[in-house]
Amino acid sequence: MKESEIKVSIVLLTYFHEKYLERMLQSIFSQKFDARYEIIIADDCSKDNTINIIKEWQEKYPEIIYPILNQENQGICRNEYNGLMQCRGKYITISAGDDYWTDERRLEKQCAFLDKHLDYFADCTLMEFRYTDGTSTGRISLEEKYWDKEFPKEDYYKRKFFGDGGMLFRNVFEDAAARDKFSLLYKFSRDIEDIILDFFMFDYGKVHITDYVGYCQTVRRESDRNEHNYNSLYIGIKNIVNYLIVIHNIDCYYGHKICLKEWYKPYFGHLLYFIIKKHRFGAIRYLQYVPIKYIPGFLWDMVKEQRNKEI
């Protein structure tokens, strides 16, 4: 079978996922999907049993599973980019090893939509948030007004998340310019890839939101925070600064032509709170990542919020 006949490339990102990886793989292999697909498992130097699980499944499905096993930890952004560059399918979807799929016809339905609607670049299922034990948080990615229609990129610019875990998008990486562009994933950040990826998606075309849940994202309780994930690696000021730098880099990339006020605002507030309440005045230097034009408005909004609380 020719490489061009691969319909979907699944990029599966793993990092200390021994407790969850088989659940994810089982959810993929339970798909009722007649076309050929490949699974590129990009592991970022896990030190638990994740790699052994990958090797076991690869031995069972050598024509489907293709591992990329990093010998040194590179961060999720570089790991994801490396996986994307190996994709041979017409379409691509990216999943985390601790999440799982919840609709057995997800690939069938998404491929059918993109095959038919050539003016769309991506199709995205709704995403449910569940705890590590599988119980629901009671939240899904988008309210009903966005279902079964195009997601406005203007809403994303205003920091309205659509949940990209269930996204299937067209493979553009035969084009050198696209490969160079998406290399900014790891040049902009080490461990925050979803914001960058989503902004770039809108540059290639429209994004459609389905009316069904096809993806489950795992949410960590406090008892799970000692596990290896972004929230345990970066806490407090490190988390705030990482996000500010990413937003700043995106802002510069687009020549400051997109209004990212709503993206800057919460991290500015968190940073200011950290400086004042924790008396960490050295962190003032990180304000350089917030455009000066937004700061007076942010401060005024904070004053109004405080007044409302006092009333």
Image: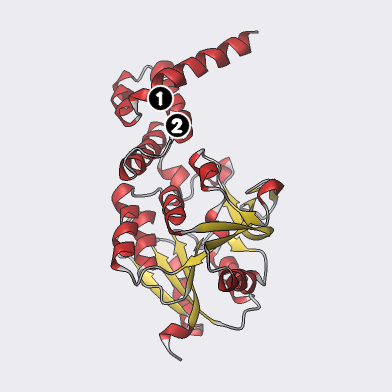
Q: Residue at x 37, y 39 (%)?
A: 257
Residue position marked by numbered label 1 in the rendering:
294
Q: Residue 47 vs residue 117: left or right?
A: left
> Would you call the spot at circle 2 few (<14 residues within 10 Å), some (14-19), or many (20 or more)?
some
Q: Residue 288 vs residue 137: left or right?
A: left
Do we see residue 44 in this rendering? no
Find residue 261 and name its label.
Answer: 2
Q: Nearer the viewer, residue 268 or 130?
A: 268
Which amino acid, mark 2?
Answer: Lys
Q: Nearer the viewer, residue 221 or 49?
A: 221
Q: Are marks 1 and 2 in contact (CB under 8 Å)?
A: yes
Q: Residue 145 vs residue 260: left or right?
A: right
Which amino acid, mark 1?
Answer: Tyr
Above or below, 44 against 53 in this view is: above
Above or below, 236 against 121 in this view is: above
Quadrant position of residue 105: bottom right
Q: Residue 141 vs residue 298: left or right?
A: right
Measured from the top left, where is residue 180 in percent x and y?
Answer: 28, 60
Q: CA distance from mark 1 to mark 2?
A: 7 Å
Do we see residue 146 in this rendering? yes
* Label 1 SS: helix
Q: Nearer the viewer, residue 194 or 151?
A: 151
Above or below, 180 against 285 in this view is: below
Measured from the top left, where is residue 256 in percent x and y?
Answer: 34, 37
Q: Residue at x 39, y 66 (%)?
A: 84
Measured from the top left, where is residue 144 in percent x and y?
Answer: 71, 48
Q: How many marks?
A: 2
Q: Nearer the viewer, residue 13 or 158?
A: 158
Q: Residue at x 51, y 47 (%)?
A: 153
Q: Work out whether mark 1 precedes mark 2 in sequence or the reverse, and give the earlier one.
A: 2
Q: Quadrant of the C terminus?
A: top right
